[in-house]
Amino acid sequence: MSNDLQELFKKFMEKYESELNAAYKDKEAGKAKAFSRPFASKVRNDIPKLIRAQLTEKIYKVEGSVGQGNWAKVPWIGVFDKRVTTSAQRGVYIVYLLNKTTKELFLTLNQGVTDVITASNSKAADNLQNRAQSIRSKIGSFPGLESSLIGSGSKDYDAGCIYYIKYTLDSLPEDEKLYSDLYKFIEVYKAYYDKVFLTSEENDVQVEEGEGELQVGQQIERIFEYINSKGFVYDEKLLKNFYLSLKSKPFVLLAGTSGTGKTRLVRLFAEAIGAYGSGRYKQIAVKPDWSDSMDLFGHVNLDNKFVPGAIVEFIKKAADDSDKLPHILCLDEMNLARVEYYFSDFLSIIETRDLVEDEIVTDNLVPKICYSGDEDAEKLYSNLMIPENLYIIGTVRLKMKSRGYP
């Protein structure tokens, strides 16, 4: 294997079309394994290995492809931020695209096209172009990067391109410049992650009705890989059960001995879906003296004013979110107090969940009688229900000298 990226790119650009044509001739001649040619290893292994060695952060996955089975008309080498996507079919990622006919190589920030095409065949190109323009407007311009329509040989990749640099055989730079260009795109990718992905519904763990098991599996895989990239290891089956439990009912308990990573898992999960750091994650430490639901819901003080409890303001924030993005509420060490005393009313309200006109509703969180005449508080909270974008996760520490957990 060559250690020279320029040399490998040059061979890739020069020889891919002839190798592709030779493979098709072998197939027509009835030769077995016509597409199992050594040249493919340069794209799948050699080039990704060199690029991978330049990226020290564990969040990146590098993969090359000439297609499955028959070779692709547009081969590619992709760099994926695992927090965003691990698949060329969806999300935003860095990708080198080869036009085999013109022998031009494009380094691009691009979009996965499969999901968009599946969702809207007739308007796929328009949707991709509009999304690319929207992303550019949010992350800004970058010197030396082009945004006009490219000619990769794929109309979908062309439409989905956000920024690019074009290389020709006559202008293919040395390794130092090739890697410098890659680092520039890494910075653009980071800008996308910070300014678009973390503030967009793209990163939310929401699977709409009808999307199917495949999408659920992809979401779980993305969360699993994000957590691993942060240096933590959890069993993948545990994460799957955790995720699916939250999808079926918005209250999940994590129980285990001290130091098993219960609270950390909740925070990592919130990070993986973009809730942590954006005001959509709240961790509340349960107090040993909590004795009734007023500690959660609120109480009336000596001035006859309603004082919201530990969770009310956060729940109201989730309910008021017009985008309905997931909000994660972590009740830490729930069995430090008698759960049946302070949490039973809340559980009862969860059980009132019902689907009304395509929206999940519950009984009101705080009964009118609790406001004791405080009209301002009543206006704010009297119609507050448990919104469907709120997910409550409790942790329970086992084998400790605390209140028993029923």
Image: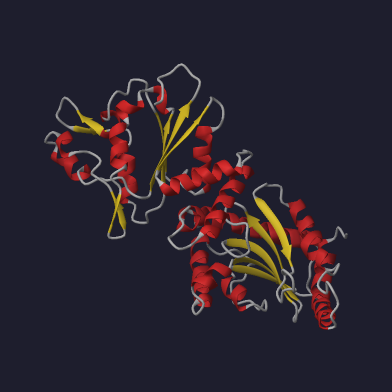
Residue at coordinates 63% horizontally, 38% vertically from top-left? 233
Residue 300 falls left or right of residue 318: left
The scheme the figure's colours follow is secondary structure
Name the image quarter holding the C terminus: top left
Count of marks, rendered view: 0
Q: Residue furthest right?
A: 1
Residue 182 falls left or right of residue 146: right
In depth, the one of 177 and 252 nearer the eye is 252
Q: x, y percentage for residue 102?
A: 74, 81
Q: Is residue 331 visible?
A: yes
In depth, the one of 118 and 109 nearer the eye is 118
Name the image quarter holding the N terminus: bottom right
Where residue 85 sits, quadrant-wise, is bottom right
Residue at coordinates 58% horizontally, 62% vertically from top-left? 92
Residue at coordinates 49% horizontally, 52% vertically from top-left? 198
On screen, residue 370 above or below 273: above
Q: x, y percentage for residue 155?
A: 61, 78
Q: Residue furthest left?
A: 373
Q: Is residue 6 visible?
A: no
Where residue 315 sits, quadrant-wise, is top left
On screen, residue 368 above or below 62: above
Where residue 376 sits, quadrant-wise, is top left
Q: x, y percentage for residue 357?
A: 27, 60
Residue at coordinates 74% horizontally, 53% vertically from top-left? 52
Q: x, y percentage for residue 258?
A: 53, 24
Residue 334 falls left or right of residue 140: left
